[in-house]
Amino acid sequence: MELFELQIREGPCLDSFRLNERIIAETPETMKLRWPRFGYRAVRSGYKSAYAFPMRLREEQVGSLNIFRSEEGSVSSEDLLAAQAFADMASITLLHQRFSFEAVVLNGQLTNALTSRAILEQAKGILVGRRGLNIEEAFTWMRHHARNNNVKLAVVAQEIIDGHLN
């Protein structure tokens, strides 16, 4: 049902996401009136009521949680609270996973930057010793060589360190 909902761009989950609020359709008639294509398909599939709960943490909305029932009619306020609590926990889990992934990516980028910086400094030191340049002249030479040969500065630095470039 959720895939169909996405394909036709109609249904409780999408409304919940767009409006950032709980959506309730407790009868087959309500579903068909509110979402004609989705409602008819849901009823044919045996669902008689649908609910969607926003998945958010503070102001950040990450999705919506659908719940379909094979019975029509109201659910208790406790059930509604429990469903929203489940959506909230799922939101926290998704955001935690996203932040963890972003932290790993950032850590990799910082490690790469520090490694590149160390390689550049080492290569500048080698040029100072081999060519009698000062640090600024060594860096200018490396940058000029990288641009003229259309290679990255880190590649030039590694070639200097490896002894392939004097």
Image (cartoon, rainbow, N blue to C red):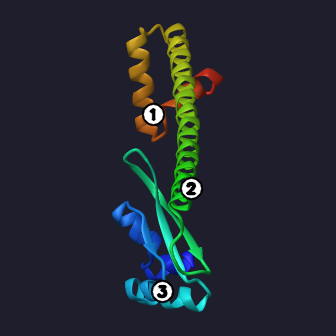
The disc, 1 or 3, on the residue closer to the chain's N-terminal end is 3
Q: Nearer the viewer, residue 89 or 165?
A: 89
Q: Which amino acid is tagged 2?
A: Ala
* Direction from residue 112 to residue 9 in the image, left or right: left
In the image, 159 versus 31, the foreground residue is 31
What is the secondary structure assignment of the residue under circle 1?
Answer: helix
N-terminal label among 3 and 2: 3
Q: The disc labelled 3 sits on which kind of residue?
A: Gly
> Which element is circle 2 on?
helix
* Residue 15 place in picture, x, y as percent: 39, 71
**On-image quarter of the N terminus:** bottom right
Residue at the spot of label 2: 82
Residue position for label 1: 146
> Can residue 166 be seen?
no
Q: Which residue is mark 3?
A: 39
Distance between mark 1 and mark 2 Cα atoms: 61 Å
Up the image or down, 125 lies above or below 24; here it is: above
Residue 55 x, y percent position in the rendering: 48, 55
Q: Residues within 10 Å of mark 3 (few under 14, many from 20)?
A: many
Residue located 47% across and 59% down the image: 63
Say left or right for 158 vs 152.
Answer: right
